[in-house]
Image (tube, rainbow, N blue to C red):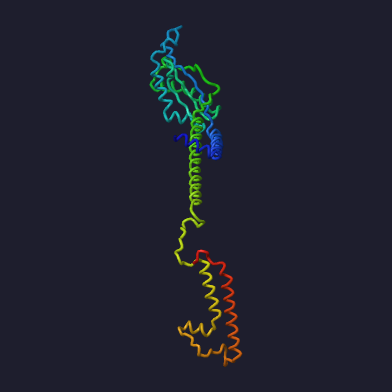
């Protein structure tokens, strides 16, 4: 079931899958350039018995018994840090070699392997190590005062002139690149699919809500007798019209908490005494303001909220 869901997700987000595959291919090409295959050269060196151990006219290949011990000693000597430092001097940082008795044979045969990033470097290192085998044998036997006729000898029986590519490091790097690219691609498809589906679910839930109010705001039901927004606006306009029709002296008294008296004369509007012409002008202005307020109220009666009682 989990595999089926994963395949369905990859099918829905096929464009992300295509981008991931292309990116993985590009990364593999980069890995092949950065991690080229190593070049490996091999040689086989046979240890021969000393001339004093072979009769005149005898065959030295029939007297190979017991030469494994000198082979082990020579292997330890050439694998030491001092010998390795001398043999790898001037080689590339990726160059290396190994030496030991060949496990595929029963005779005293040393298997020498030289490994480098280039073919020429591998062959050069192999020649250097093979040339060090007889010199090291002579040095070790001379140090213990072994006479020359009794010294163990060596002979090269096989040596590569053309190295063989070793693609193990490249294959490992390619496997790691493919695995990393595949994991990243699958996770990207899954994350994008989850994000898209959540966004779609939120939009669907938003469309299913009644009304067109904004998300997070619930619609409040109007109580019976409550005035709507149109009625409130109309009331404000009425109040402004009434204030405009009220003389300034009356507004001043209302602000000061005094009630106007009908018999109290109106104070003059400017410096000096008020005349009958000024009072008539104030009366005409009040009438015009009242008619304007009534006209504004009449024009808004048709726009009141139908829910208003």
Query: What residue lies at 56% left-to-right and 89% top-to-bottom?
Result: 268
Q: Which residue lies furthest to the front in this view?
A: 309
**Residue 228 rendering spot, x and y as whole percentages:** 50, 66
Of 214 and 158, the residue lying toward us: 214
Choose between 82 and 122: the one closer to the eye. 122
Q: Is residue 86 above or below residue 59?
A: below
Please identify the residue farthest to the top as the structure is shown: 57
x and y, in percent, of residue 94 in the image: 50, 32
- In this rendered view, identify the residue nearer to me: 7 or 305: 305
Residue 28, percent across and down?
54, 34
Q: Is residue 267 above or below residue 232?
A: below
> Height in image: 199 above or below 30?
below
In the image, residue 274 lies at what x, y percent? Answer: 57, 91
The mark total stands at 0
**Which residue appears at 44% of the width and 34% of the height?**
1
Residue that lies at the very extreme toward the bottom in this rendered image: 273
Pick whichever, 302 or 220, lies toward us.
302
Residue lying at 48% horizontally and 82% vertically, measured from the top left: 254
């Amino acid at each position: 079931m989990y595999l089926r869901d994963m395949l369905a997700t990859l099918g829905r987000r096929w464009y992300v899958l295509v981008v991931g595959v292309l990116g993985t291919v590009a990364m593999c090409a980069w890995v092949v350039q950065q991690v080229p295959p190593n070049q490996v050269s091999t040689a086989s060196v046979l240890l021969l018995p000393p001339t004093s151990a072979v009769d005149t006219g005898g065959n030295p290949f029939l007297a190979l018994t017991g030469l494994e011990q000198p082979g082990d000693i020579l292997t330890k000597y050439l694998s030491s840090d001092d010998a390795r430092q001398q043999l790898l001097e001037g080689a590339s940082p990726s160059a290396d070699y190994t030496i030991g008795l060949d496990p595929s044979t029963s005779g005293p045969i040393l298997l020498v392997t030289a490994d480098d990033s280039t073919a020429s470097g591998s062959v050069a290192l192999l020649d250097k190590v093979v040339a060090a085998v007889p010199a090291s044998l002579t040095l070790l036997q001379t140090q213990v005062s072994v006479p020359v006729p009794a010294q163990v000898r060596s002979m090269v029986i096989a040596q590569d002139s053309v190295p063989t590519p070793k693609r193990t490091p490249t294959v490992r790097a390619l496997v790691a690149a493919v695995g990393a690219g595949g994991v990243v691609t699958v996770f990207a498809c899954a994350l994008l699919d989850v994000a898209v589906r959540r966004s779609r679910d939120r939009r669907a839930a938003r469309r299913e809500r009644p009304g067109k109010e904004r998300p997070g705001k619930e619609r409040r039901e109007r109580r019976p007798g409550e005035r709507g927004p149109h009625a409130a606006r109309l009331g404000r306009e009425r109040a402004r019209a009434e204030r405009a029709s009220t003389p300034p002296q009356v507004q001043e008294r209302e602000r000061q908490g005094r009630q106007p008296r009908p018999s109290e004369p109106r104070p003059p509007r400017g410096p000096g005494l008020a005349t009958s012409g000024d009072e008539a002008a104030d009366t005409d202005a009040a009438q015009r303001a009242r008619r304007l307020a009534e006209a504004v109220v009449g024009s808004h009666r048709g726009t009141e909220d139908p829910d208003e009682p």
